[in-house]
Structure formats: structure tokens, C-alpha cells
Amino acid sequence: PLDEGSGTSAGDASGNGNTLDGAVTWLGTGAFGGSVNVGAAYGNGSLLARTGGAGSLAGINATTGNQVSFSFWLKPDAENQGSSVFYLGDSNTVAGNRIFQTHLEWTDGNNYWDVSWGDGTNQRLSGNLGTVSDALHHYVMTFNGDTGAMKVYKDGVATLTGTAATQATLPWASIRNFEIGAASFVGFWPGGQVDDFAIFNHELTQSEVDTARSQGIAALVPEPSTVAILGLGGLLFLRRRRNG
């Protein structure tokens, strides 16, 4: 949720008690509660966790499945600044291969949503989302490995849609680095406001996207027995409810 308001750690709202660490500027208001400013424009670095480094990735490494969704609020400092809102890669010492990443926006004005870029499948969805730096906007990025469907929602609308190669299993176990607000190994430091950041291991439905936007990610928390433990902070990592 990024509501701490001070310090250099953000708590993991899944209840696992882990933190995501980094120098940030805390803001008193966001989409829901507080928020943070990240990136070089503020001299802040990023919120990050790395195996053998600032945090533990044991929870996300143990996750399985071939679907993923990211939900967050973002107000970049400027258009076309080449920002990496999040970066999850397979190395904790160099850039390595990207597993999940988005540029919002890149220097050409387009958003790029990449999934498993380094494993040869090269899923990518790109396109212009219009003005992004005027206000906090809600974004959801999804990938469904069963169908290959990729989507980018802006303020509840599936603004970008496309179909990539299907994929039976996403390489969750290979993740060694997770950053919010940067891809620091390759120098992609945005500046901007981030709030209410979450990762899900299923493709969010339109109804869930609407709920995340109108009520916040806390409204999508499942029963405690179904919460996937994630050794990262400032976010929720959630499994889908199962019937029966």
C-alpha cells in the first residue's frame, strides 16, 4: 500500500511481515492513503528487493502459474522520460533477463509491457496511452499464458490489447531482483509518484480491475489461507480464490 509515511522500508500487506527497502520521498496523500515518490529526479533511488541483498524473494520464487497481473497508480514527473515502473529480472548482480517489466512511458511516448523477455518467447505489448504525467492514473497490466492475451488498462479501460505466444509456465522461480521505480542495473531511473502496488498470479477480470481502481487492492485480499506469501514489501501478492 506504501502508506508508511517515513523511513526507508515499505511493509508487505500480505501479512508475511517482509519489507521492500530503498530511499524514497513519502507523500501524505495518494490514491489510497499515502504514496511515494521514486526515481532520480528526487535523488531517491528505488524500492527494491534482491536475493542475497536488500530483501528476500522466497515467496515469489515459490509461486507457480502461467498468468500474471500488475496493478498500481502512477504519476510520472514528465512525458517520455524512459521510466521503468517495475523490473523483475533473473540476476541480483547485473541486469540479466527481464521476467516482468514495464516502461511507462519510454522515450518514444509508448508504454512497453514485457513478460519473460529473456527466455526466448518475447511477449511484448506496446502502444501510446495518451497523457500520463497530468495526474495519478490507475494501471493494470495482464498476461494470460493459456491464450497469449496481453492487456494494459488505464483508468479501468483496456486501452492496449494484443496476443502473444502462449506459455505454459512463467519463470517465477528465476526471479532474483525486484524493483519498483527503476531498472537500476541499466540506468532506467524514472521520477514519479507510485501508490497501491500489487502483483497477482492470475489475469484480473474487468470487475477486479474496477474494484482495484475504486476500492484499492485491499478490497481484493482473499481469505488468509489463500494468500501467497511474498518476501517483498509495499504490495500485495495474491492467489485467486478457489471454490470447494
Image: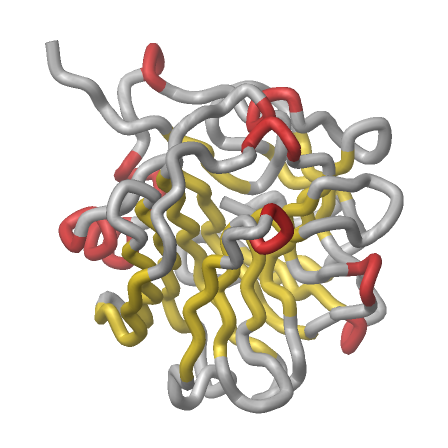
Would you identify the image quadrant in which residue 51 lies?
A: top right
User: Which residue occupies the extreme front position in the image?
Assistant: 120
Total marks in image: 0
Q: Nearer the viewer, residue 166 or 68?
A: 166
Q: Nearer the viewer, residue 237 or 9?
A: 237
On the image, the x and y values in percent for residue 191 come to: 69, 74
In the rendered structure, the answer to whether residue 189 lies left or right of residue 3 reads right
Colour option used: secondary structure
User: Which residue occupies the extreme left position in the image?
Assistant: 244
Above or below — where is 108 with respect to 82?
below
Q: Nearer the viewer, residue 187 or 133?
A: 187
User: Which residue occupies the extreme right position in the image?
Assistant: 93
In the rendered structure, the answer to whether residue 59 lies left or right of residue 40 reads left
Above or below — where is 99 with respect to 232?
below
Please name the residue shown 81% across and 64% down the image.
Answer: 186
On the image, the x and y values in percent for residue 167 come to: 39, 42
On the image, the x and y values in percent for residue 175 come to: 65, 36
Please name the residue shown 49% across and 24% down the image.
Answer: 63
Q: Nearer the viewer, residue 175 or 190?
A: 175
On the image, the x and y values in percent for residue 158 come to: 24, 69
In the rendered structure, the answer to whether residue 205 lies left or right of residue 169 reads left
Please name the residue shown 34% across and 66% down the image.
Answer: 152
Please name the residue shown 60% across and 34% down the image.
Answer: 11
For the C terminus, the quadrant is top left
